Amino acid sequence: MKQTFASLLLALAIILPAHAQLLTPTAPASQPLDRIVAVVNEDVILQSQLNDAVLSVQQQYAGHTDQLPPMNVLQQQVLNRLVLMRLQVQKAQDQGIRVSDADIDQAIQGVAQQNNLSPDQLRTEVERSGSSFAAFREQIGDQITVQRLHQSVVQDSVSVTDSEIDNLLSSPTYKSGEVHLAHIQISIPAGGDAAAIQASQAKAEAAMAAIKGGMDFNAAAIRYSDASDALEGGDLGWRRLDEIPPAFADTIATMKPGDVSPALRGPTGFHILKLVDQRDSSRKMVTELHARQILIRPSELVTPEQAEQKARDLYQRIVDKHEDFAALAKEYSKDDTSANVGGDMGWFPKDAWGKTIANQLDQLKDNEVSKPFQSEAGWHILQRLGERQSDQTVQIARDQARQAIGTRKSEQAYEDYLRDLRSNAYINVLVPELRSADDQSAKSP
């Protein structure tokens, strides 16, 4: 939950808007309060829900309305996102993915803390924005549901091998560094014929012409892109170059900040990229500590009080009687990973064993022994043995390569999944001016 409260409300309103009965500004007063604008399998999206989401976007861009497309295009963009979200929620429910009230309570607590609010204050702010708190809870629940669907799909379809990492790092096309990107995606409908491909290409060319004619890139993304981040101006944030498909990375490597690429053909459509900024990667130096420990755990045979007393006795034997720490650790410590080697924890990044141990080690000098202290695992005695600066550039590069390959595969896998999900769904947009090229208006499940 890293979003600010305002942006979170916007995101949630776009995903599954609150059920307030709002009309578009151009709607005549005599128009019925609500109507069905789209059928999504056995579910429906109401005019009031679409209006709420559109209004949230308009509020987000207050003072920058020149970046918004005409109302019918904006409504299409928002409706497409609502349809896709509704499909994901339906699929997750079909697969038995459930979110408990406790899960929602925990997420709401996180939102409140992120915005320095109590849960009651968060409720007040939600209701002040014009939404009901019950609808807000439902939106949070659906968001968690979709996140779990994404995890399920990716987990089942994406794996990364050591050989793939080796191949990436040794490839002449491997590029280090990070880039801040924005993009416009013009998708080709699943199973699209030559006419569909030509229509997508024409839309991409229109977007390029608008940008060359002076339209702000973010505004062009809102107007032309059909990616899920279109309403955020297509901002992809900072990404490592090794996360980007090689064909696109080669193009980006020739660009300078502010440059916009030509329309690039990808597996699922056309992409226009803007290089917002870039930065070089640097050597990664990590502070590592060397220590050893004795851990006394409470058990069915050892009460917490007895565990504490045992730790204090061992501390006295080490400090006052100068008995060997390693020998006592081997005999008495209950830490399975270090007891057999005299409590030696090896060299490790400071937080590797948790913040409680890290805080204790911060207070010790080399070769100094800590007084017994308690953690969730039991009672500990630590001896700090040393500190060093370790060059982790190679290992971090491997970790980043693994993440980059996994991210690339995950994004492609889930994009393919969503395309199939939409192409196999029954979607009927009942309002003609809200239909987009890839609406499947007469397809049976």
Image (spheres, grey):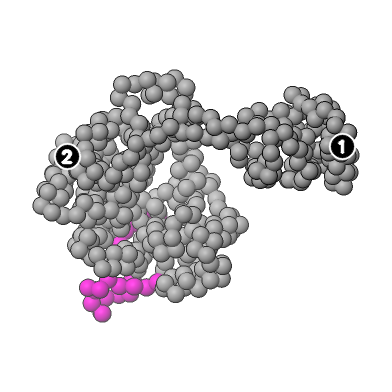
Tell me: residue 244, above or below residue 104.
above
Q: Nearer the viewer, mark 1 or mark 2?
A: 1
Which residue lies under the disc numbered 2?
Answer: 262
Residue shown at the point (26%, 57%) measured from the top left: 76
Q: Is residue 23 magenta?
A: yes
Please report the residue visible at 41 percent of the width from the left and 68 percent of the height from the top. Answer: 19
Residues 203 and 432: in front is 203
Q: Give the mark nearer the N terminus: 1 vs 2.
A: 2
Bounds of the magenta segment: 20-42
Q: What secondary structure is found at the residue carrying circle 1?
A: loop
Q: Is residue 111 visible?
A: no
**Residue sitting nearer the eye, 180 or 328:** 328
Residue at 21%, 34% in the rendered image: 254
- Residue type at numbered disc 2: Pro
Q: Nearer the viewer, residue 307 or 421?
A: 307
- In the displayed structure, does residue 88 sit left or right of residue 336? left
**What secondary structure prevails in the magenta region?**
loop
The percent position of residue 132, horizontal first and vertical second, equals 47, 71
Specify the quadrant that holds the C terminus: top left
Name the spot of residue 413 as percent of width and height, x first.
39, 36
Mark 2: secondary structure: loop
Residue 327 seen in the current view: yes
284 drawn magenta: no
Q: Which mark is residue 232?
A: none
Q: CA distance from mark 1 to mark 2?
A: 75 Å
Would you say the residues marked 1 and 2 are in contact, meaning their CB atoms lie under 8 Å apart? Answer: no
Circle 1: residue type = Asp
Report which residue position mark 1 lands on.
320
Front-lying residue, 315 or 208: 315
Local packing at callout 1 (Cα closer than 10 Å; few below 14, some 14-19, many 20+) is few
Left or right relative to 134: residue 421:
left
Q: Quadrant of residue 323?
A: top right
